[in-house]
Amino acid sequence: MRTHSVSVLVTALVTGALARPAMVVPAAPAGAAGTISGKVTYTGTPPKMKPIDMAKEPNCVTQHAAAPVLTENVVTGPGNTLRWVVVYVSAGDQGSAPATETVRLDQKGCQYIPHVLVVQPNQPLDIYNNDPHSHNIHPLARVNPEWNRSQPAGAPPIHTKWELPEFIPVKCNVHPWMHGWHMVLTTSHYAVTGEDGAFTLSGLPPGKYTVTAWQEQFGTQSQDVTITGGETKTANFVFKATPY
Amino acid sequence: MNETRAETGVWIGIATISMSFAALTSALVVRQGSASDWQHFQLPPILYVNTLVLLLSSCTLELSRRRVAAGVPDVVLPPQGLHWFQITLALGLLFVVGQLLAWRNLAAQGLFLATNPSSSFFYVFTALHGLHLLGGVAGLTYVLHRLTRTARPGARSALGAASLYWHFMGVLWLYLLSILVIRI
Amino acid sequence: MPDIAAPAAVHRHAPPQGLLRRHVFSLDHKVIGKQYLDLALVAVCTGMVLSWLMRLHLGFPTVPIPGLDKLSPNGAAGGVITPEYYLSLMTMHGTIMVFFVLTTAPFAGFGNYFLPIQVGAEDMAFPRINMTSFWVTLVAFLVLIASFFIHDGPALSGWTAYAPLSAVGKDAGPGQGLGQTLWAISIALFCVAQLLGSLNFITTTLDLRTRGMSLARMPFSTWAWFITAVIGLIAFAVLMPACILLLLDRVAGTSFFIPAGLVISDRLQPHSGGSPLLWQHLFWFFGHPEVYIAILPGFGIISHILPVFTRKPLLGPRVMIGCLIAIAFLSYTVWGHHMFLSGMNPFSATLFSVPTLIITIPATIVTLLWIGTIYGARLRFTTPALFCLGFVSVFVSGGISGFFLAQPSIDTYLHGTYFVVGHFHFVMGVAAMFGIFAGTYFWFPKMFGRMMNETLGKWHFWLTFIGVYCVFMPMHYLGLAGNVRRYSAFTDDYMKPLIPLHRFITIAALFTGAAQLIFLYNLIRSRLRGPKAPDNPWEATTLEWSTASPPPFDNFGGRPPTVSHGPNEYGVPGAAGDYVMQASR
Amino acid sequence: MGKLFAVVLTIITVVSTAIFVLRVWWLPADISAHGPQIDHQLMETMVSSGVLFVLSQLALALFVWKYADRRDGRKVREFPGGATPMVAAAVVLVGAEILALTLVGSKVWAGIYQTPPDPNSLQIDVQAEQFAFYFRYPGPDGRFGAIHPELMNEATENFFGLDPARDTTARDDIVVPTLAIPVGRPILLTLRAKDVNHAFYVPELRIQQDFVPGLVIPLHFTATQPGKYEIVCTQLCGLGHYNMRAYVEVMPQPQFDQWLKDKAAQQ
């Protein structure tokens, strides 16, 4: 079985355990909330980010004529930083408010923007097709019901949501190179590392937390962090990269 | 004489069923050749007992038919004819029970429908034959009901047709058994 | 076969009493025939609406169709048809038309109604089985239609349902989950119904012919139904196990048709060793005889009706029957021509192309016999006559394009293009339909005791005749240009310039479809308020015209006819009214 | 009414035949070595069946025009000679035509599908999947890496499920979505399907072959005209069937070598 799909199963089980935390939101304690921040880097030689050849879809070729799109399974930045890593509180979370604002996923230039999208259970999700040709969204959900729908050019956005926590790989059936992830997390304390590989989890009441970092190719790592007052703790993650 | 309609109907039914099993046999041959994952397995010995039971039931049915034919036409069924007829039905059901035992034997060996292609075809062949045999049992009971209730002339030709179907079930099983022995 | 003495008129079943027994669960072959025809009518309306939706999508892909998103929120959000919904429409259009219209109407519908009367019997050999086969067909139709209303929508693997797309299950895409399972169950049920129906047809033809009705004196339509029943018997007996194996592959995890190592929707499928070509062989062994099941009753109806309106006997009646039998035999040797490029051994392509070309000889003879019958005729242009002439012309057009597809070398280019779509629509979608229209206009007076309106009938003919040529002849040009079939949109550079031709076809299809509403209106109005029909409005000779309209419960009012003449006694010098009835003294 | 039918039928026949004869819509120009034979076979069939089509339609129209019933009580006349001339015409005419078409046709077909490929033809591995074609060149070592279905991962562009870590021959394989071939050189494609049935069809190359899961099907041809042509799928494979397009670029040998080097660099 592929390495990262094993990791998907493991994390799905772990987050599944958190599926039904008491949803009652404890009143914020008197002291200020703490934050955890840090950086995600890698060691070793990461797989080469190959240019994606979109010859099949001329519209996308013209859109990316200037800068060819690279594969996004391992996106490295200056200083061995890793992008698209989801860092979240996997244990010790004292209940998170269910998110209500709508999350937007765009399909532009035959790419999913953002590549990794984090939502909370039952959070409204709108999927737009901004390309002049049709796409076909196929989230390969196992825990949630799987669905597979086409979205012709100019079709109205698909309004959907995910009920159960799961890490769902998403692919476009019409453009095989188009891949993305929908991470359904029960906690509201999460962050996705950007170009600089940095993340900050803020608004954490004092308590003992397990912070987990997930990367689609290299799996997950966890660290325990204890927050006593309003201070900022650092937690860095280093993934071991292999070229293939 | 439209009395032959029942027999003509059964002959056409026989043609249909043989065509279906011919199609399944060709599917078996093609499937066996198309990949190297064909694993032969030992046929449960009870199958041979079942075969004897089925052939015996054909003999008893023939005896019963001769008794009925020898009897005075349109008179209520002579007792021996009825006696042999009921034995035929019992043997038929015994055959079906025997087939189920064969299935349990295979299941005990861990060979289920989807385990490998040879067991798939074994189950499909025996299931379809068993189904058509139960159809034959239903036909025989219907004929028995018509014979015993009102000895209308049509009933005797219906018995002829039903016994023709039953003998075909036996022949079909012999053919299937040979295919199973050779191929699976 | 010696002349069979007419059976003592033993009333095996007395006329039914209750409303339910008379109209719903009836044992009377005439009621069952009408029920089949009504089912086919509903099916053809459904099929035609599906073809409208398909053509609208191909001609004008971005134009939203109002109300469609209500029928299928997933498939056509905002009324714009998505590719998977288009393929579902195509699959259901094909399946409904081939099975529930072209096999049900000419064979089961007219055959059930008229075969017993034409051979002088009072009913089918096994009335209960006959009733069962109708109700199983209806259940099969409902199961098929049900797949429109499930979450994932109907199957999308075409009416041919090639494995592994049809065998893998929901991983293969939308519609391939429950939708494909319902498709397979519906077709398996349909096979059961057709096998029982064929059994009835053959037994009735062999055993229940009245005194004097030897095989040689049977009308051509009876011959056609008899031969179609024999073909159907063998063909559906092969499709039945194929559907069972497909269902087992889908539900029980067996691997009859699914090989090892398939990665579908990023999942390695848990199957191994199956052969997709095995499904194609089993399907097309049924598939090609099926297209003859659709057209042979049409041959029978045209050969039955043409003499009536040319007032002269059919040219070469023995040759005609010989050709029907020859076509029946050859139809089982040609199935490989659907699979020239399917990965089958190329040597067998040459092997299959020879009988495919040979089968054009009996088809040509049949056409020449019809044209020869019109020579020296005294043509009466009633609506059934016009539809017969239309049938001959359209069958010629459809048959000619068969020459191209029969040769593997040309099929290399034309396979999978609109040339094939034009070919089989001309032969099955139009010629067989003209056979059904001719049969309806010809036998309506006998079935309902009322005449259909001739003016409406003629309008219906002219609009449909010209319409079908405008719809299906351009498909041959699309095929030559390489336009691939079963595409829901034409985004390829070399297909984009063909879109204007698709728009023309779409408009023509809408007009031709609208013309069918004239036929529908004529049917309903004539059933209610058509003028009373005499027993023999067309001055025909066969047995159904020597009894009342509509015929009594046991067809001949207790007096089974004695047949003294063949069905072809037209233009007889010295006979009263230039024809001699089959049952005349 | 008879005259109207005859006129309408004649117009339909004339218009349909004219569109065929004038080639308003016609095959694209052929660019393959075996193409002219197929075009010739098509033209021969077009002419012979066109004649058959026009004759029978016009005969039908003529008879319907002449023999409408004018209630003048004239007798019906049988076709001179009865049915035998019909049978004879069908057997002789159509039989001869079939014989000719089969004899020539089978040689054309054999030339493409029954002859073994040219030994020094360029071998390219083609994989069709739900809804794209991918082509694999052996790379400098001239050997293809082994395919592992469980390793197939579109996100990492590992379409053929290669295992470069352990399989050295797979390291230099070049996987691209465009089929580039040198002009004039025989090409041998090995077609394999990843999931369901697909097909490889290039109208200009006059070549078409289905992909069947579980089978590796060889297909060989030689392109004679440089240019960029479209490869489309003609076997229903699911919702993206209409969009499974790829391009075949026929280029002179030096340009092809350069193209291959550039693609190798990107692997």
Image (cartoon, rainbow, N blue to C red):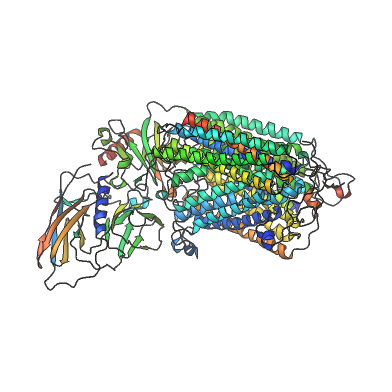
Total residue callouts:
0
Residue D96 spot, x, y in % from top left: 65, 30
Left or right position of C174 against A74: right
For the point 25% across and 58% down, which residue is it? A17
Asked if residue C427 can be seen in this view, the reply is no
Left or right of C135: which side holds C341?
left
**Quadrant assignment for the N terminus of chain A:** top left
> Which quadrant of the figure contains the C terminus of chain A?
top left
> Which residue is more in the foreground, C18 or A65?
C18
Q: Can residue C249 be seen in this view?
A: yes
Tell me if D122 is positioned left or right of B123 in this view: left
Which residue is nearer to you in this view: C1 or A178?
A: C1
Please tell me whether residue D266 belongs to the stretch shown in magenta: no
- Image coordinates of residue D133 in percent, x first then y, are 38, 43
Q: Residue furthest front?
A: B79
Q: What range of the chain is rendered magenta?
A: C4-11
